[in-house]
């Protein structure tokens, strides 16, 4: 049940255009073309404002050189210091809201603060005791605190954020406990098979593999009454004291008292959704209706602890329950022999107390306006952190983003005229469940779908030296182009692109649901990318969501000299500029088609063999497969701003016989029922053929983009009429690129996850972070649901065919 009541929401006065939901524009390329033509006819060529249409940048300034020149000064460390000096949990540090806004303004951006009222939880009290069952005696009381490190100033003080899990339910439970490995769906199933019952017990789970909120969800679904989450040294790539590495601050190994805080919202789980748990699918503006949040958050208490704290607890399970032999179940915790438990001799008392508040969360936006006001490039980073520091997560990204603002500001100050809008967005509340970005995306959905060309996300910009990129294939080419122009800051490596290719090959990963791009890509269909420098195999351990993710760690281990912060500002800023300043948008649609073919191949390999020869009988399935409903047509038109049309009500004419081909829907179904006996392999072959056609059409389309760009670059020799024609073509070409991704929005949403609407990308239902391609198909396979698979195949094939038709 998704309600969008954007139009009814009160609008603040003075909000810049990019945060105001606007009416859908009726302009089509034709109209635009005529307007341009009319303009030229009326005004001739001589007046300066002609530059608006034909020559958008009458700039003497080389934007790349000027931008990079500004970044020869590196102030990232200065910003990092400021962002990481005080606690800034979601909704709690208005000083940093104002600081960010002032900086944006100082650099010439039009800035605004956009508030939402969102349910979050703040820590009040916690307790964890290991108890002897027979006597009730407390054997061990966990301190639930990270050690103070003198040389690292943000690890001490009376303003430290306690160790806690956002949205973990309040409660005081005493129960037996069991070790459940990573707490994945499979792990709980394996325990069941081993005869270990989790019902009524506290689940002790190690971090890793899947999003922590889903660990709590699966524990709850399996009857657990509480959850403890800990970091096992076995997940530290061998950078451990056992292998001779010293702990932070002396060395690169994990500090044994470090605790990973974090949200246990259910995020991408079945039935769940990101954003405010009380406002599924609509914005948390004052006065909005609120719903029961428990589809998105849990009902059992949970606490995070360090490996030092979990040791005495898990050691008590030695010799009790099942001894685990599967190496995937065994970590490297000293003194624990990896038994499941429970033990009759001991139990745990777990107490969690938090305030659940409707709190005001503040996003900050800063805009540079371009000549084409209807096309916007967005760069986003969140500001909130779980701890006082947060030098990696997220404020390395915040520091890089302020550097981008500064360098763009210098361009602007020098009189450079931007072609498209560039907007920087500083989100609040990402950590709790992508709160600020999701609520904004829901609030301004129509405007964003209309205007945004691409969303570029940077969360942790630096926690190590290895560049990671995930995103939509249409953007891969521009990312590679820019990476090829920058130098990697290490002798002998070559360009940033050389570095990337040597680590990842010529491949961009699929986005899941780890950060603020989620609403843009998976709810709105806006092409997105997420980037950041992370750790390699032998990099120092990054203390994620711990007090040791501090300025001191960053300066000493993470990024000496803030060199990678600076490189990220160069890279991300130049990608945005490449997107905003190219007269013909640099999206490469054939790359998208190539990836679709590969993705479909992997899906095909997972289809049960017996399905291929199974006949599709159900009339309703055919209906979904062969026809567009009025809702389909409406949403496609609206999502693509009218640039992608539905031309024919039945796209699968190969199923119809010419002599009986009627136009009436009811008749059509009758004929299909009577004459066709279709097996799945026929449909699969059809999809493969459609993908090949799409690939061909998109290659031709890209060739046309290149041709248009060449003509544009040589436009001086054209007559004015030919210039008008050329620009008209470019407008159409750009709009088809801008709205290409929107075609993958399925307005009905995914199965049991209606908020997630992208038919190519979603987070896995059982993993949370990791991306899963073709979710409509893969989930149907996982659920062994043949008919849903066929319906899903119909949905994606219709999209392929429609897009191909439009691109030709
Ligand atoms: C940045 O930090 C350095 C070193 O602390 C300092 O010398 C410099 O003045 C700072 N610059 C700005 C603009 O804050
Ligand atoms: C939690 O429950 C335990 C055992 O019932 C009790 O001893 C303890 O006082 C309770 N803690 C709080 C803060 O209520
Ligand atoms: C949350 O609500 C509690 C109880 O109403 C209040 O005491 C506390 O100050 C609030 N916390 C924040 C950070 O707003
Ligand atoms: C690819 O597209 C071109 C241009 O539209 C067309 O002539 C050609 O037949 C297509 N090739 C295939 C294999 O569909």
Image (cartoon, helix red, strand yellow):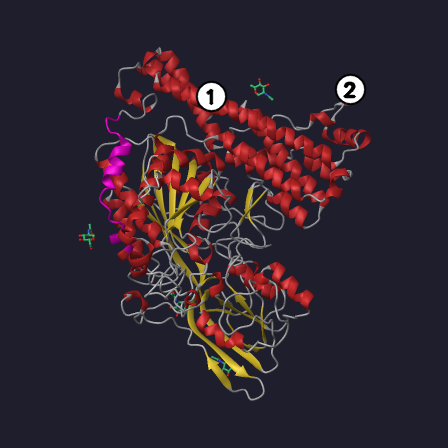
Between marks 2 and 1 in the image, the one whose residue lies nearer the viewer: 1
Separation (CA) of disc 2 from disc 1: 38 Å
Q: Percent from the top left, x then y, of residue 40?
A: 34, 16
Residue 124, picture quadrant: bottom left
* Residue plotted at (65% across, 40% down): 604
Please tell me whether residue 455 is drawn above or below residue 48 in the rendered image. below
In the image, 510 versus 664, the foreground residue is 510
- Total numbered labels placed on residues in the image: 2
> Splitting the image into four quadrants, where does ligand 3 fall?
bottom left
- SS at mark 1? helix
Q: Which residue is outermost to the right?
A: 674
Q: Quadrant of the C terminus?
A: top right
Residue 407, picture quadrant: top left
Whether residue 167 is visible, yes or no, is no
In the image, 423 versus 537, the foreground residue is 537
Please tell me whether residue 16 is drawn above or below residue 768 in the rendered image. above
Q: Which residue is outermost to the bottom?
A: 135
Q: Which residues are magenta?
A: 59-80
* Residue plotted at (43% across, 38% down): 454
* Residue plotted at (27% across, 24% down): 58
- The residue carrying mark 2 is 659
Q: Bin the neighbour count of mark 2 within 10 Å (Cα to Cα): few under 14, some 14-19, many 20 and up.
A: few
- SS at mark 2? helix
- The residue carrying mark 1 is 704
In the image, 553 versus 410, the foreground residue is 553
* Residue plotted at (25% across, 40% down): 409
Q: Percent from the top left, x then y, of residue 89?
A: 38, 61
Q: Bin the neighbour count of mark 1 within 10 Å (Cα to Cα): few under 14, some 14-19, many 20 and up.
A: some
Q: Percent from the top left, x then y, of residue 88?
A: 34, 60
Magenta-drawn stretch contains 73: yes
């Amino acid at each position: 049940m998704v309600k969008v009541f954007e139009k009814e929401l009160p609008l603040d006065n003075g909000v810049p255009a990019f945060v105001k939901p606007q009416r859908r524009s009726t302009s089509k390329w034709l109209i635009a073309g005529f307007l341009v033509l009319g303009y030229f006819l009326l005004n001739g060529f001589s007046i300066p404002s002609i530059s608006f249409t034909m020559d958008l940048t009458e700039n003497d300034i080389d934007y790349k050189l000027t931008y990079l020149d500004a970044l020869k000064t590196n102030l990232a460390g200065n910003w990092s210091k400021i962002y990481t000096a005080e606690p800034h949990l979601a909704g709690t540090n208005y000083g940093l809201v104002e600081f960010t806004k002032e900086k944006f303004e100082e650099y010439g951006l039009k800035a605004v603060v956009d508030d939402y009222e969102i349910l979050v939880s703040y820590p009040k009290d916690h307790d964890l005791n290991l108890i002897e069952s027979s006597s009730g005696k407390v054997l061990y009381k966990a301190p639930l605190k990270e050690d103070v490190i003198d040389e690292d100033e943000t690890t001490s003080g009376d303003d430290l954020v306690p160790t806690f899990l956002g949205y973990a339910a309040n409660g005081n439970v005493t129960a037996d406990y069991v070790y459940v490995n990573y707490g994945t769906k499979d792990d709980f199933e394996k325990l069941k098979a081993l005869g270990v019952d989790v019902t009524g017990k506290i689940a002790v789970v190690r971090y890793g593999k899947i999003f922590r909120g889903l660990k709590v969800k699966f524990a709850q679904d399996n009857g657990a009454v509480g959850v403890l989450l800990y970091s096992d040294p076995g997940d530290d790539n061998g950078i451990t004291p056992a292998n001779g590495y010293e702990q932070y601050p002396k060395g690169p190994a994990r500090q044994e008292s470090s605790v990973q805080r974090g949200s246990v919202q259910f995020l991408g789980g079945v039935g769940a959704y990101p954003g405010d748990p009380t406002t599924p699918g609509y914005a948390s503006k004052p006065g909005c209706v609120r719903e029961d949040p428990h589809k998105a958050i849990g009902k059992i208490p949970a606490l995070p602890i360090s490996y030092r704290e979990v040791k005495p607890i898990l050691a008590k399970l030695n010799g009790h329950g099942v001894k685990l032999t599967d190496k995937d179940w065994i970590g490297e915790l000293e003194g624990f022999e990896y038994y499941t438990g429970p033990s009759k001799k001991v139990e745990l008392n777990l107490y969690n107390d938090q305030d659940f508040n409707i709190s005001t969360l503040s996003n900050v936006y800063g805009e540079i306006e371009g000549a084409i006001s209807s096309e916007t490039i967005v760069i986003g980073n969140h500001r909130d952190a779980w701890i006082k520091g947060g030098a990696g997560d997220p404020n390395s990204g915040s520091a890089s983003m302020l550097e981008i603002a500064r360098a763009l500001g210098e361009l602007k100050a020098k009189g450079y005229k931007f072609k498209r809008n560039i907007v920087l967005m500083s989100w609040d509340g990402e950590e709790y469940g992508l709160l600020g970005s999701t609520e904004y995306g829901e609030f301004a959905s129509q405007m964003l779908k209309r205007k945004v060309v691409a969303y570029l996300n940077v969360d942790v910009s630096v926690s190590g030296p290895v560049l990671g990129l995930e995103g939509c294939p249409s953007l891969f080419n521009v990312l590679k182009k820019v990476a090829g122009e920058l130098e990697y800051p290490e002798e002998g490596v070559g360009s940033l692109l050389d570095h990337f290719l040597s680590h990842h090959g010529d491949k961009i990963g699929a986005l899941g649901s780890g950060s603020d791009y989620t609403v843009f890509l998976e709810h709105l269909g806006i092409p997105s990318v997420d980037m950041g420098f992370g750790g390699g195999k032998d990099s120092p351990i990054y203390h994620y969501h711990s007090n040791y993710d501090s300025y001191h760690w960053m300066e000493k281990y993470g990024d000496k000299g803030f060199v990678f912060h600076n490189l990220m500002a160069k890279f991300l800023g130049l990608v945005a500029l490449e997107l905003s300043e190219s007269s013909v948008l640099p999206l490469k649609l054939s790359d998208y088609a190539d990836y679709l073919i590969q993705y479909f191949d992997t899906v095909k390999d997972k289809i049960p063999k017996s399905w291929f020869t199974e006949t599709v009988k159900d009339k309703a399935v055919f209906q979904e497969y062969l026809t567009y409903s009025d809702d389909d047509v409406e949403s496609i038109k609206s999502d693509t701003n009218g640039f992608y049309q539905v031309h024919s009500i039945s796209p699968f004419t190969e199923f119809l016989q010419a002599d009986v081909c009627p136009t009436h829907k009811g008749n059509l179904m009758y004929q299909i029922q009577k004459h066709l006996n279709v097996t799945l392999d026929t449909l699969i072959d059809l999809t493969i053929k459609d993908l090949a056609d799409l690939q061909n059409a998109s290659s031709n389309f890209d060739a046309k983009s290149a041709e248009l760009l060449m003509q544009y670059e040589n436009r001086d020799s054209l007559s004015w009429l030919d210039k008008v024609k050329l620009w008209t073509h470019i407008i159409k070409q750009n709009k088809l690129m801008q709205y290409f991704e929107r075609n993958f929005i399925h307005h009905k949403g995914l199965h049991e996850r209606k908020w997630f609407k992208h038919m190519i990308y979603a987070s896995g239902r059982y993993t949370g972070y990791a991306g899963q391609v073709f979710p409509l198909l893969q989930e149907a396979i996982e659920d062994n649901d043949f008919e849903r698979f066929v319906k899903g195949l119909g949905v994606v094939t219709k999209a392929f065919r429609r897009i191909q038709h439009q691109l030709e």
